[in-house]
Amino acid sequence: MSLLELHSVTKRYGAETLALNSITFSVQSGEFVAIIGPSGAGKSTLLRCINRLIDVSEGDILFNGVSVPKLRGKELRHHRTQIGMIFQHYNLVNRLSVLENVLHGRLGYKNTLQGILGLYSEQEKREAVRILETLGLYEQMYKRCDQLSGGQKQRVGIARALVQQPKMLLCDEPIASLDPSSAKVIMDTLREINRTMGITVLVNLHQVDVALHYAERIIGINRGQVIYDGPPHALSNAQIYQIYGSEAGELILDLKERYAA
Amino acid sequence: MEASLPSRRIRLRPRNRANTVLQVTLITLVLLTAYGLVTLDTRNIDVFAALGNMFNDFRIVFLEARLERLSWFELFRELMITVGLGLLTTVTGGIIAFFLSLFAAQNLTPRQVTDTVKALMAFIRAVPTVLWVLFFAVTTGLGSVAAILGMTFHSISYLVKAYAETFEELDSGILEALRASGANWWQTVFQAVVPSTASALLSWTFVRFEINFSVAIAMGATAGAGGIGFDMFMASAFYLDLRELGVFTYAVLIFAILLEWTATRLKETVGIKRPV
C-alpha cells in the first residue's frame, strides 16, 4: 500500500483561480520525491493540502490509508504529527532557545495545558537533544534562534520536524534562502534522513539541477497540473522546458553535468 | 510648441477638491482667531501685572516648596495610593485585555469575531476615562471604586487595540509551522505568539501605566479617589498653600522620571532575557 495517495486533488480560490487541477499521484513509503515547477505553479499549495494547512476543494488524499480532507479536531492534529514540515523561511520562534523550538515538534502529542506551559517529559527532551547532536547543533542548544545562521536555522527546522517522529517530511523550498554550501548540507541531511531513517521526503525545489541530483523521482508541475512524473534520468530537456513553460535556452541551467555524472 | 503653453498664470498645485477645502479651512480659522482677539473680554486686567503675579506664583511653587500640613511619610503614603490606583487598574486591565485581544487579532480569530470585539472596544475607547468613572459613580457613588472600575474599563479597550495590533504584526509562518506540527490554538498562542511579542506587550502596558498614573492623580481630585491628587486639590483650592503644592508637584515629577527609567530598563532586560 502506498503511504500517500492523491486522487484528482483540486484547489480553487474563488470562482476563477484554479491552484491545483485534478492532481493524481501516489508516493511509496521511503521515496525521495522532488516537485519542480515555476513560481505560482501550485507546489506550495500542494504540500499544504497534504497536511491540511489548506483545505482541498475536490478530490481525496489518503495518508496511511486515512482520508485526509474530512479530518477534524483531534484526528487532524494526530494526522499532522505524522508529517513534519520544513519551510523556506525556517519559521522558528526567534526569541526562544533552539531546544524550545525543537520541542515545539512535540506539541501535537501534548494536551493543551502541558503545551501552554511547555512541560515536556524527560524522555522527549533527551530525544530532542539527541537529534540536535546528530545534526551538529549540540553547542547551540541554549542559543536564541535569532543568533543562528541561515543554515543552522534550517537544521533546527529539520530537528523540529524529526522530533515529531514523522512518517513523512514535507519540505517547502528548504534551500531557497541559503547559500550554496549551506544548501548542500541541508540537502545531504535530507537524503541521509531518507536513507537511514526510512522517512519519506517530499521536497519542493526551484533548483532543477539539485532536484535531478538528489531525488529518485521528479514530479513536474505547471499551472496546477502534473506535467511529468518519473525518474530523473528519463526527464528530457524538452520536458523541463515544458514544465517551466519557456523556450529552450531561456533557463539558467547547466544540464551538461547530469550527463557527465 | 507654443500652443501647449497656458495663457494664464501657471499654478504650482492642481486645483482639486482637497486643496480647495484646505485653503477654505485655513482662511476660516484665521478669521475666527482675529475675531476672537478683537472681541476678547479682558475684564480690565492689566496683562503685565497678571504675568508678574503668575511668575511669582511659579516661584513660590517651585522654589519655596515645603511641607506644612502633611509629614514626609504621609506624602509618601498618598503618593503610593495614587501609584496603587494606577497599577491596579493597569494590571487588571492588562490581564483581561490580553485574553480579549486574542479574539481581536485577525491572524488568530475569524474575521466576524474580531470585527465585533474591535467595534465594541472602539466604542469604549471613544468615551473618555473621566466619563466612565462618572458613569460607574452612579451605582457605586463617587470614590475609589468608581475610579478603579472606570479606569480599568478604559485601560482594557486601549490595551486590546494595542495588543491585537502587536499580534497581527506577527510572522504568519511561525503560526503555520506550529499548526503543521499538530499544535492546537492555545498551544500556538502561548508557545509562539506570546514569546514573540512579550517585549512589545510589556512596553504597551507600561505606556498605559504612565497614562493611568496621571489619570489617577486627576481622579484623586475629581472623583475623590484619594491619593496625591486629592491632596493637591486640597492644598490649592482649600488651603491655598502654594508651597505644599510645590512639594506634591516635585513628588509626582520624580516618580514619573523613575517610572520612565524603570520602563526602559525592564524593556532592555526582557529583550535579552535568555542566556546567550
Image (spheres, grey):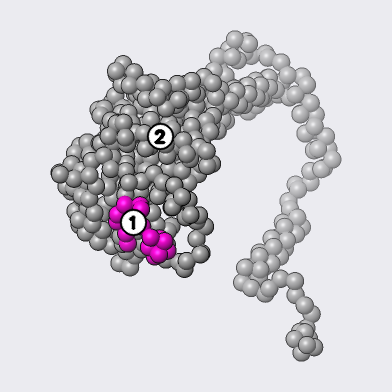
Q: Residue at x 22, y 50 (%)?
A: A26
Image height of A49 relative to A111, above or below: below
Residue B109 shown in magenta: no
Q: SS for tag 1?
A: helix
Q: Which residues are magenta?
A: A227-242
Image height of A85 relative to A128, above or below: below
Residue A76 percent across, percent down from the top left: 22, 41
10 Å neighbourhood of mark 2: few (<14), some, or many (≥20)? Answer: some
Can you tell which of label 1 and label 2 is closer to the viewer? Answer: 1
Could one spot residue A1 in this view of the protein? yes
Q: Amino acid at mark 1?
A: Ala
Residue underneath mark 2: A189
10 Å neighbourhood of mark 1: few (<14), some, or many (≥20)? Answer: few
Q: Is residue A231 left or right of residue B55?
A: left
Which badge, 1 or 2, is on the more N-terminal residue? Answer: 2
Quadrant of the frame with the N terminus of chain B: bottom right
